[in-house]
Amino acid sequence: MESELIKKVLDGDVRTAAKLIRGIEDELADAFEALESVYLHTGRAYIVGVAGAPGAGKSTLLGNLIGVFRRRDMKVGVVAIDPTSPFSGGALLGDRLRMQTYGTDGDVFIRSLATRGWKGGLAKATVNTVHVMDAMGKDIIFVEAVGSGQGEVDIAKVADTSIIVLTPGMGDEVQMMKAGILEAADIFVINKADREGAASVRSALELMLKMKTGRPGDWQPCIVLTEAIYDTGTEQLAEGILKHKEFLVSSGQMEKRRRVRAELELVWAVESSLRNYLESMDKDYLTRMIDDLVQRKISPQSAAALIVNIAENRER
Ligand SMILES: Nc1nc2c(ncn2[C@@H]2O[C@H](COP(=O)(O)OP(=O)(O)OP(=O)(O)O)[C@@H](O)[C@H]2O)c(=O)[nH]1
Ligand SMILES: [Mg+2]
């Protein structure tokens, strides 16, 4: 039988969902327990990652995209990952302000996650928040993340479509972009195209994409120019997202991406159950094991195998 809480989440109840997400942020045991049932009701939403340098215009773009998808009668979720760095300490308020137009629309649900020092990792908290929105019945969920480098690659693991937002004046930076970032993006947005230099970023990108050796049948990343403050280019960007979705579905890659994500979540779950087990273990036993390691009577691998064995037997 579903708990009252799960029923409310499935009904799209904003208060319950918000509370559950706070529980995920605080890593409360109750929240993780609820997530187990939530997970079984997910897999329907389409997930879009939006990454880019601080101030690239991600939130403004998202505000526009919300409009486009709402006009198509789709329910929208947004997870904004807030870097609590001294530079963008005001991001949370900024995001709220920029997206406040949708504050009263019950079919738009926006949450910020602060990137404080999670044990479980940011990607995991993000995926779990996405799961809550998915279970709420959101059709499309955007994940906004600041990042230059690894961040984009991480978001790509979570998303069906990954968007990287660049801005004019980044031509040289594009040339320095690591191959991994290039691979991670399905759509490149050059925002602030009202400013000088958008064309040169575009040619730098095109050159890099040309050099990329893809397999036949692979998705060719597209480039969209936008002026987010004037809501220009939003339709093309939305088209790009839907085209990429169609490609993933018809090529069978959607299934593949979702299997990769499921595997990733399995690994996280294994890691956290072992970590929990380790924390609950008899401290004397653990101390003796560490003594044995220090005295080189046993290797870390064999010690780990012993622990996994005990954990396995206890599960039975
Ligand atoms: N000239 C110009 N300014 C823009 C454009 N899009 C956004 N901006 C401005 O750029 C600034 C940053 O926009 P945001 O949407 O907050 O950017 P962001 O990437 O979400 O920023 P963080 O979340 O802090 O990393 C704001 O002052 C916007 O008004 C654009 O197309 N042209
Ligand atoms: Mg933002």
Image: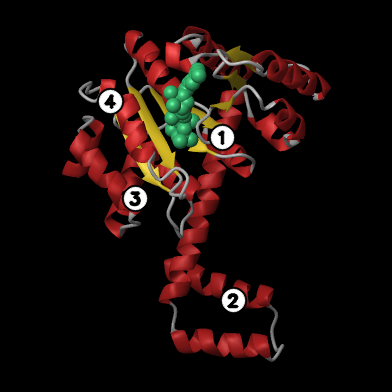
Q: Residue at x 42, y 54 (%)?
A: 116
For label 3, the residue is 24
> Which of pointers 3 and 1 indicates the residue nearer the eye?
1
Give how far apart the Cα atoms at labels 2 and 4 are: 54 Å
Looking at the rendered structure, the kind of residue marked 4 is Gln
Looking at the image, is mark 3 or mark 1 earlier in the sequence?
3
Question: What element does badge 1 sit on?
Answer: loop
Looking at the rendered structure, the kind of residue marked 2 is Leu
Looking at the image, is mark 3 or mark 4 earlier in the sequence?
3
Neighbor class of circle 2 (other Cα within 10 Å; few <14, some 14-19, many 20+) is: few
Residue 113, quarter of picture: top left
Residue 103, quarter of picture: top left
Looking at the rendered structure, the kind of residue marked 3 is Ile
**Does mark 1 have its CB less than 8 Å from ligand 1?**
yes
Looking at the image, is mark 3 or mark 2 earlier in the sequence?
3
The x, y position of residue 43, in whole percent, is 42, 31
Q: Would you say the residues marked 2 and 4 are in contact, meaning their CB atoms lie under 8 Å apart?
A: no
For label 1, the residue is 53
Q: Residue at x 51, y 29 (%)?
A: 50
Please give left or right for residue 178 compared with residue 261 in the image: right
Looking at the image, is mark 2 or mark 4 earlier in the sequence?
4
Please give left or right for residue 215 compared with residue 50 in the image: right
Q: Which mark is residue 100?
A: 4
Q: Which mark is residue 306?
A: 2
Question: What element does badge 2 sit on?
Answer: helix
